[in-house]
Image (cartoon, rainbow, N blue to C red):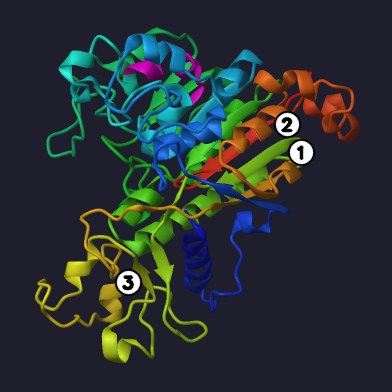
Amino acid sequence: MGMSTITATRIFKNQQAGGLGEENLLSFEEFPYIGIARTYEVDYQVPDSAGTATAMLAGVKINANLAGLDSRAKWKICDRAINEEAKLENLITWAQKAGKHTGFATTTRITHATLAAMYAHINDRYWECDSKIPPEYKDCVKDVARQLVEDEPGKNLNVVLGGGLNQMGVPVKQGDYIYCTRDDKQNLVEKWKQDRKSYLFVNTTKDLMSADLNKIDYLMGLFSPGHIPYVSSRDNSPEGQPSLVNMTAQAIKLLSRNPKGYILLVEGGNIDNAHHEGTARRALEETSELADAVAYAVSATNEDDTLIVVTSDHSHTLSISGYPGRGSDILGSDNVLDILYGQDILSYANGPGYLSHKSDNCLEAYWRKFTDKERKDPAYKQFSGRYVNKETHAGEDVPVYSRGPQANLFSGVFEQHYIAHAICYIACIGPHTTYCNYNKHPASRAVSSATYNSSPLLFIFSPTLLLLMYICHN
């Protein structure tokens, strides 16, 4: 979720409500502090999601496509001794050691890249279930799903909400999309249930929203075989899939029962999926939903004791271009250039939309002209300057929005891995406890210990992400 996605969503959201669009602000754009994070990885100039999420959570830049392992570990090559040395602790581990509750809510699979960086240590982010691991490495490393259920810090997470029944070995009905299957035939949801007493597993909106959260300490919700469907195609019935706002609300209600605080990561992961498909409308709808989740988090928490950080692990190649007039439909065409070129206001530097904009799907033809109705279809693929079957990430810096205790630390231009260190210091957890307990620490001067003893951290993140943290100093 780079600046072009934020700008386009700002316009789109307001236009959906009948406004011109440009004058609008998304919920997190009203936060008092803004910083800029540099997203490159140890080996890649333009990053992937697992490496960048690890940087934000563990405070260390790593190689692309790995999760939870420093740069001594290599992609797709598992060495047990090297992996053991390369294992990284992160905000989730540090928060759990401090007695805080932890959890996440996502619109992707719960084993997808960003979430894997929270709890897994693995040489390939795509090893989400055992059938994806090469035979020679099956005794070297557990798949991501098993690490979630069997190992720390995954097994200690209080809230796990998203998609991914396949990866967890839960039988799904015929015709459902299957990303990977479990060769070991384990049902990891049943294993998760056996390992705890006070828990609830849900798989519909009705069950999630009617849950008595005062009676449980652990909540898992899996609402689809793979990623949760896009906003435009989601089943909004009580038997369907919850919104990101629904999941955020229930997560905060459960986690906030802990007087020592909590960390909640909320991911609008389908923003990334929509961009990869070249479908800008879907990406804007998903970003709009993320903004709604942020708005709920703001309304449900206290700025005096809750740090909210909204950022992205990386950007995408979306562009807003041409010379469209003020108030032009952001999903429409440039009213000047369209006469000659069929110009979309939104386009991609690369992606699958290139060929569909040729009149006969070949490289020698003229550009096609699309109607406004066609452009508004959620499945419409915006023009791309170069054909690739899957749009790529982009390498520019990403914004970081923050509010709450010491949010001013997220100002200026900084390395992406700085985010973890700043949060660690503000929350007084992990390796920075020596400094935050120093009597000149800003928390000790600005906020009473009583206030911090009832505090969290919310991290909203994705391809767009919200990290919500209820901060607690003892």
Q: Position of residue 61 (x, y in %)?
A: 50, 33
The answer for how far apart the CA atoms under marks 2 and 3 are is 44 Å
Magenta-colored stretch includes residue 142:
no
Q: Which type of secondary structure does the marked residue at label 2 adopt? A: helix
Mark found first going from the N terminus, 2 or 3: 3
Classify 352 as above or below 425.
Answer: below
Q: Residues within 10 Å of mark 1 (few under 14, many from 20)?
A: many
Q: Earlier in the sequence, mark 1 or mark 2?
A: 1
Q: Which residue is mark 3?
A: 376
Where is mark 2, residue-wise? 426
- Residue 410 x, y percent position in the rendering: 68, 45
158 over 174 or under it: above or below: above
Residue type pointed to by label 2: Ile
Q: Which residues are magenta?
A: 146-160
Could you say which quadrant of the image residue 406 lies in? top right
Q: Give the image quarter of residue 425.
A: top right
What whole-number distance in Å separates the C-alpha atoms at marks 1 and 2?
A: 7 Å
Residue type, label 1? Pro
Which mark is on residue 405?
1
